[in-house]
Image: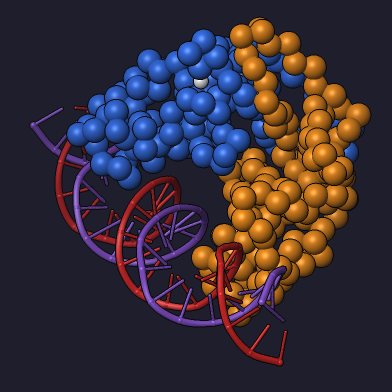
Chain colours: A blue, B orange, C red, D purple
DNA sequence: TTATTTAATGCAACATTGTTGCGTTTTGCA
DNA sequence: TGCAAAACGCAACAATGTTGCATTAAATAA
């Protein structure tokens, strides 16, 4: 394993993801760090951040891939991505429902690789308007 | 609303989806009906078939969009999918884990529309080999 | 059967999202 | 300060999906 470096572009990307209260897509992140680095670099940074367990990758119900820094997943402990996500069909935002843990009890014959637990609907903000 | 027509291309696309034992992506469908119609036409046919409730649009855990025929759906097209699904990364088959009900307790401010609960991994059949 | 209506198609062109190769720059550290 | 390699910019490529418009063909009425 190579030793990760803390570059300005990496800091900028991580900052945008951290300061957002919903998951961001690659185009959204690139838009927000515009000028900080190249488009390709954003892709590579995102891949590295996922590998380093700094952020996690969320697939939306429409297939778009978003990235979020989950508050429940601390760097110190294992990234157990066993919680629900809420995907608003109005504002398209995805948020982690970290408190909603899903307990899966599959037979040992199933080898689990990844969980994909998303609820679509209308979020509180869009509900009010 | 316009009146749908039963074209040869539409029949070919629906036949491929129906005769497959797992969900197919647009490229896979186009490959199988090769010569029957244009690439763009496949996209439009798929959109129409979804609108007509003839097929399902399924977002896989990797974000790829696949299409499958409605088999367990009744006429009213009710999708009470409050159970888990297992998506095998080896044989590509998606099965309903009907006994695995997920209980969701969201605040009333969230209006739930649909649940997407899928686990990816290797199914028992592929595990054996 | 033939004519009419318009759903559906083909094709080109465009848009978005993601990947790869390679030479250059920058970071972390000795 | 000097070095190894991690990270970057850029160009080029690839996969996937969309739009506009002229043409074709499916359903139905005459
Ligand atoms: Zn919303
Ligand atoms: Zn999360
Ligand atoms: Zn399998
Ligand atoms: Zn099901």
User: Looking at the picture, how far across and down is residue B60, in whole percent?
Assistant: 65, 44
User: Looking at the picture, how far across and down is residue A31, in whole percent?
Assistant: 29, 33
The answer to which of A18 and A7 lies nearer the viewer is: A18
Q: Residue at x 47, y 25 (%)?
A: A91
The answer to which of C29 and B102 lies nearer the viewer is: B102
Rendered image quadrant of residue B5: bottom right
Say which quadrant the C terminus of chain B sits in.
bottom right
Q: Residue at x 51, y 39 (%)?
A: A64
The answer to which of B55 and B100 lies nearer the viewer is: B55
- The relative height of residue B11 versus residue C1 in the rendered view (above or below) is above
Q: Is residue B84 visible?
A: no
Tell whether B101 sits left or right of C30. Answer: right
User: Looking at the picture, how far across and down is residue A66, in whole percent?
Assistant: 49, 32
Q: Residue at x 73, y 35 (%)?
A: B118
Total number of numbered labels?
Answer: 0
- The relative height of residue B17 versus residue A102 in the rendered view (above or below) is below
The answer to which of B3 and A9 lies nearer the viewer is: B3
Tell whether A117 sits left or right of D2. Answer: right
Tell whether B47 sits left or right of B72. Answer: left
Q: Residue at x 70, y 29 (%)?
A: B114
Q: Is residue B103 visible?
A: yes
User: Looking at the picture, how far across and down is residue B15, in whole percent?
Assistant: 77, 67
């Amino acid at each position: 394993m190579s030793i990760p470096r803390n570059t300005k572009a990496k800091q900028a990307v991580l900052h945008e993801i951290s300061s957002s209260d919903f998951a961001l897509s690659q185009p959204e992140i690139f838009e927000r760090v515009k000028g900080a680095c190249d488009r390709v670099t954003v892709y590579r940074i995102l891949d590295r951040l996922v590998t380093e367990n700094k952020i996690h990758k969320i697939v939306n119900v429409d297939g778009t891939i978003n990235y979020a820094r989950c508050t429940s997943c601390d760097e110190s402990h294992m990234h157990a991505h066993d919680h629900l996500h809420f995907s608003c069909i109005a504002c398209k935002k995805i948020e982690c429902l970290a408190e909603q843990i899903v307990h899966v009890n599959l037979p040992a014959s199933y080898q689990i690789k990844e969980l994909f637990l998303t609820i679509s609907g209308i979020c509180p903000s869009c509900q009010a308007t």
